[in-house]
Image: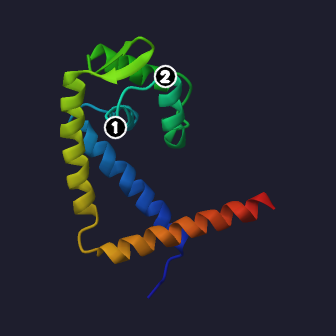
């Protein structure tokens, strides 16, 4: 029996998570970044700077202008609007967010089928510590 290293499984899981989320959101004609905008704005209006700061950890290296194109698409679809310097969800944006949220949650439940809450918490904790350790080692 071959035991694969953690890096192998992290890469496999990352790819699987990306594909699952992309397929789930595609049902609603949303990209991951658009979902992240809707999800962030679902907690309340934000300035463009605040939104950018909130989404920075999720930024993708897919070229400049992608964020602007995604925002333009959300505005064109009348899901997001800008008023008095604040970005906010429209009523259709709120409804689409709720629908997308249900699909994403169902996908997460399917993904973690057979994994207990304790097992999940341990896995996340171990990965977090390994990331922190790697960051510390790199910073030396």
- Residue farthest to the bottom, as pictured: 1
Q: How is the image coloured?
A: rainbow
Residue beneath label 2, please? 48
- Could you say which quadrant of the image residue 5 lies in? bottom right
Give the residue drawn at x 41%, y 11%: 84
- Residue farthest to the top, as pictured: 84
- In the image, residue 75 sits, relative to residue 124, either above or below, namely above
Q: Which mark is residue 87?
A: none
- Could you say which quadrant of the image residue 124 lies in? bottom left
At label 1, counting other C-alpha atoms closer than 10 Å, the crowd grade (few under 14, some 14-19, many 20 or more) is some
Residues at marks 1 and 2 touching, judged by CB atoms closer than 8 Å = no
Q: In this view, does 133 lie to the left or right of 69?
A: right
> 113 or 89, which is in the foreground?
89
Give the residue drawn at x 18%, y 31%: 95
Number of marks present in the image shown: 2
Q: Is residue 40 left or right of residue 55?
A: left
Quadrant of the image containing the C terminus:
bottom right
Q: Is residue 61 left or right of residue 113?
A: right
Residue beneath label 1, please? 39
Give the residue drawn at x 36%, y 77%: 119
């Amino acid at each position: 029996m071959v035991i694969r290293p953690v890096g192998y499984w992290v890469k496999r899981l990352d790819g699987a998570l990306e594909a699952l989320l992309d397929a789930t959101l595609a049902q609603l004609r949303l990209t991951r970044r658009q979902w992240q905008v809707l999800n962030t704005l679902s907690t309340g209006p934000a300035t463009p700077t605040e939104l950018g700061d909130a989404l920075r950890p999720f930024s993708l290296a897919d070229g400049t202008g992608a964020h602007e194109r995604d925002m333009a698409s959300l505005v064109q679809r009348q899901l997001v609007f800008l008023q008095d310097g604040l970005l906010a969800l429209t009523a259709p944006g709120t409804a689409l967010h709720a629908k997308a949220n249900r699909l994403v949650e169902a996908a997460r439940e399917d993904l973690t089928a057979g994994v207990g809450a304790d097992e999940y918490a341990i896995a996340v904790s171990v990965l977090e510590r390994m990331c922190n350790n790697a960051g510390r080692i790199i910073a030396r």
